[in-house]
């Protein structure tokens, strides 16, 4: 079944914060949560899954926190989604069923789209969006 939850969006938003900081050391969960407007308990949950998947490293202590385990250009949105929600898959209906085939094609296209976008891309898009002019009427 195709599964991309709100947890995945939280994970991408939180990792975009780490990617935007360019690896300048570990960042505490509370700081990530505050900067992104995400409840800290949600960041804790997704960071635990991302650490288990090898996408994050943690450092304990006073100057502790989390940092990306790889360069942001090597971490795709698909990597993040699969770490949090598991693989994006098609329907589990019998083979040859038209609906199952359509579901499978949709899952493949969605996976391809998320595979093409890296966390570096997400961070860069956010910067571009922040620099866009705002028009008021």
Image (spheres, helix red, strand yellow):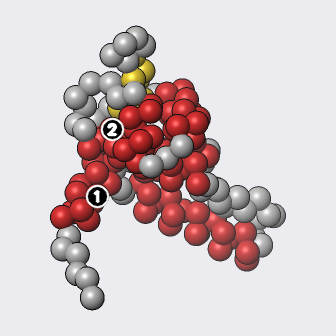
Q: Residues within 10 Å of mark 2 (few under 14, many from 20)?
A: many
Left or right: where 114 falls relative to 39: left
Which mark is on residue 18?
A: 2
- Say which quarter of the image contains residue 113: bottom left
Q: How many marks on residues?
A: 2
Q: Residue at x 35, y 29 (%)?
A: 27
N-terminal of the pair, mark 1 or mark 2, is 2
The spot of residue 2 in percent (x, y) is 65, 60
Front in this rendered view, residue 100 or 51: 51
Q: Secondary structure at mark 2?
A: helix
Image quarter where the N terminus lies is bottom right
Q: Residue at x 50, y 53 (%)?
A: 9
Q: Secondary structure at mark 1?
A: helix
Image quarter where the C terminus lies is bottom left
Q: Residue at x 28, y 51 (%)?
A: 123
- Say which quarter of the image contains residue 60: top left
Q: Residues within 10 Å of mark 1 (few under 14, many from 20)?
A: some
Front in this rendered view, residue 45 or 30: 30
The spot of residue 18 in percent (x, y) is 33, 38
The spot of residue 134 in percent (x, y) is 23, 75
The image shows residue 1, relative to residue 23, as above or below, that is below
Residue furthest toward the top? 61
User: Mark 1 — residue?
Assistant: 126
Q: Residue at x 50, y 66 (%)?
A: 109
Left or right: where 95 falls relative to 57: right
Residue furthest toward the front? 137
Residue furthest toward the bottom? 137
């Amino acid at each position: 079944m195709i599964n991309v939850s709100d947890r995945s969006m939280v994970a991408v938003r939180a990792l975009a914060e780490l990617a935007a900081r360019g690896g300048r050391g570990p960042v505490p969960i509370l700081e990530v949560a505050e900067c992104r407007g995400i409840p800290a308990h949600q960041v804790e949950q997704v960071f635990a899954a991302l650490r288990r998947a090898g996408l994050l490293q943690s450092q304990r202590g006073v100057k502790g926190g989390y940092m990306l385990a790889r360069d942001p250009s090597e971490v795709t949105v698909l990597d993040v989604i699969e770490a949090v929600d598991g693989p994006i898959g098609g329907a589990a209906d019998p083979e040859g069923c038209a609906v199952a085939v359509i579901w499978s094609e949709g899952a493949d296209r969605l996976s391809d789209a998320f595979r093409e976008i890296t966390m570096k891309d997400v961070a860069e898009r956010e910067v571009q969006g922040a620099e866009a002019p705002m028009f008021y009427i």
